[in-house]
Amino acid sequence: MQRPRHSASLSTNAYVLSITALPDCYAAAASSPADTIHLFAKRDLRRLTTLQGHPGGTSSIRSVNLHGTSNGSGQTLASCGKDGYVKIWDLNSNSPALQMRSPDGVGYLSFDISLDGLTIATGTVLNGEDASIHYWDVRKPTIPIFSHTSTHSDDITSLHFHPTLPDRLLSASTDGLLSVTNTTEEDEDEAVEHVGNWGCSIAQAGWHHDGIWAASDMETFSLWTPELDKVSEPNFKEIAPRPQHSWEPNYLIGCHKSQDRLIPIVGSNSRRRRRVAFMGYEYLKHSLIALGIWEKTSIPSRARNR
C-alpha cells in the first residue's frame, strides 16, 4: 500500500466532509459540532488557519474564479451551508468578503459559480413543497435575480455550470432527476432544456468531456449524454483496480476530469481514518464500451459522516 506523504488531523477530531484545492493551500470542511473550514499548506499539510464555516453544517466548499477578485490567480474559496448562506472568503482577513443569504433562511446544500464569475446558483433543501434554485448576480448580492422552484421536488444535492458554456447549469436532486437549465431564462418552463430520470436519490453529479456522470445514495453510478439520455450504469466495484493488499471498494468518493478522461475515485470502509492526506496516486486505465478509455484512481479510505 502506498503511504501518504503527509497527513494532518482536525483539531476537533471531526469528520472531513469535503476538500478543495486553492492556489496555495487545501481547504477541508469539518463536520459538527465544529462546522469549521480548515486551511492546510500544500507542501506539508501544516494547518494555516481555521475559518468559521457555517453553523448547522457546511454543505459544500470549492475553489472558484469570482469576477473582480483581487488576488493574483483570481481563485478564492467559496462555501455554502445549512445556515442558508453562501460565503466568498477573503483569505487575507479570514472572513467573508461577500455573503448571500437564502430568502427565508432556507438551508443550502449545493452551489456553483459560472465560468465568467458573474452568476452564482444555489440549491436548497426541501422547504415545505419547494426545493429552489436561486440565481445571484455577484455584483448585486442582496437578493436573487430570480428563482426556479419546480425544476426539482426534493433536496438539490448538486449544481454545476457547464465548463465552457456559462449559461448552462446541471442540477441533481434526491427526487431522482437530472436537469440541464438555461440560466439566462427566468421563465422556468422555458429554462429547463433536458431532464433525465434515474429513479433513485442522486447524491452527486457532474460534467465530463462526453456528457454527464451521476452517483446515487445507494453507491451506484451512471453515465448520460449531454441531452440526459442514459448511456450505462457501470459497476465501479467490479471494474475498480485491485491493489496487492486486499480491500473491497465500497463507495464512490467523486470524479475528477483529467484532459479528456474521467477519473472516478473510490474508497473502502475497511480502514476508517479521520485524516486529510496528500497522496501520490497511481492512475490505472480501464476500457469501457460507449465511453472510451477511462482512468481510475483508488485510495484506501475516506472519513465521512453518514
Image (cartoon, rainbow, N blue to C red):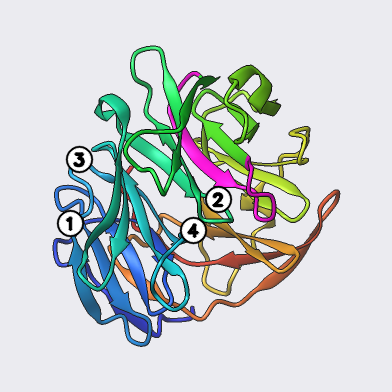
The residue tagged 4 is 267
Q: Which mark is residue 52?
A: 1
For the question of whether residue 249 can be seen, the reply is no
Circle 1 Cα neighbour tier, 10 Å, few/some/many (<14 / 14–19 / ≥20): some
Label 2 SS: loop
Q: Does label 3 or label 4 sit earlier along the sequence? A: 3
Nearer the N terminus, badge 1 or badge 4? 1
- The mark lying in front, picked from 4 and 2, is 2
Q: Amino acid at mark 2?
A: Ser
Callout 3 environment at 10 Å: few (<14), some (14 to 19), or many (20+)? some
Q: Which residue is mark 3?
A: 56
Q: Residues within 10 Å of mark 2 (few under 14, many from 20)?
A: many
Give the CA separation, mark 1 to mark 4. Answer: 29 Å
Q: Is residue 32 visible?
A: yes
Whole-percent x, y for residue 161 in the image = 59, 47
Which residue is under mark 2?
114
Q: Is residue 65 above or below residue 188?
A: below
